[in-house]
Amino acid sequence: MGYEGMIYMAADIVLGYDKKNDLKKLFTEYTDMLVANDSTFAASLKMQKYEEEIEHLHDKYGMPDGRLYIAYVEGIPAGCAAFHRYDAVRCEGKRLYVRPQYRGQHIATLLMEKIMKEAKEIGYKIFLLDTLPFLKEAIKMYEKYGFYEIPKYYDSPVASTIYMEKKL
């Protein structure tokens, strides 16, 4: 599934349910970055009940229907990714984030491959996600994995939201 000839950074991808403090830090960095680049994203966080989500991660991303991962590099949290059940055949990827100092080392690729593989093994047929136009590198990665733009599948308060899917 990976890009041809790609060299991966040595990262340990582990389930994150019992690593709440590391996840809170990563999620906070991620959402702060989004709000800094598009202030309307704060309304989206409120709509998504972000504060509740961060306190009850297992409710949204728990097994058997979802997953929540952290990537560690030399014991330091470098990134995260998750997905949850959207309906019987679709899941939605959320919170794919890699800290700036670890970008360009293919950690996002490792996380993306992990969550897509797990989603397919669970039995989902379609992987949904949303993103924002300024996340150009993420969009390029999604497109390389076969994601394509679709009509909106929920009403986001962020007008520039890009909705994508991939058949698994």
Image (cartoon, rainbow, N blue to C red):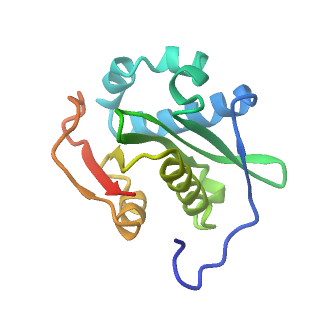
Question: Is residue 152 found left or right of 167 in the rendered image?
Answer: left
Q: Position of residue 118 (x, y in %)?
A: 56, 50
Q: Is residue 121 above or below residue 58?
A: below
Which residue does the image show at 76% across and 65% down from the upper left? 10
Residue 144: x and y, percent? 39, 70
Q: How many marks?
A: 0
- Compared to residue 24, the image places residue 4 above or below, namely below
Residue at 59% across / 85% down in the picture? 5
Please tell me which residue is depicted at 25% across the width and 42% down the height of the picture.
161
Horizontal and vertical percent position of residue 8: 67, 71
Q: Quadrant of residue 64?
A: top right
- Residue most toward the right? 74
Query: Which residue is outermost to the left?
Result: 151
Residue 94 versus residue 148 in the image, above or below: above
The image quarter in which residue 36 lies:
top left
Q: Which quarter of the figure is the C terminus placed in?
A: bottom left
**Nearer to me, 163 or 64:** 64
Q: Is residue 138 left or right of residue 14?
A: left
> Which of the pair 71/136 is nearer the observer?
71
Residue occupying image coordinates x 53% and y 35%: 66
The reply, left or right, for residue 143 in relation to residue 102 is left
Q: Please determine whether, in this image, residue 2 is positioned above or below residue 60.
A: below
Where does residue 164 sit, x and y in percent of width and height? 28, 51
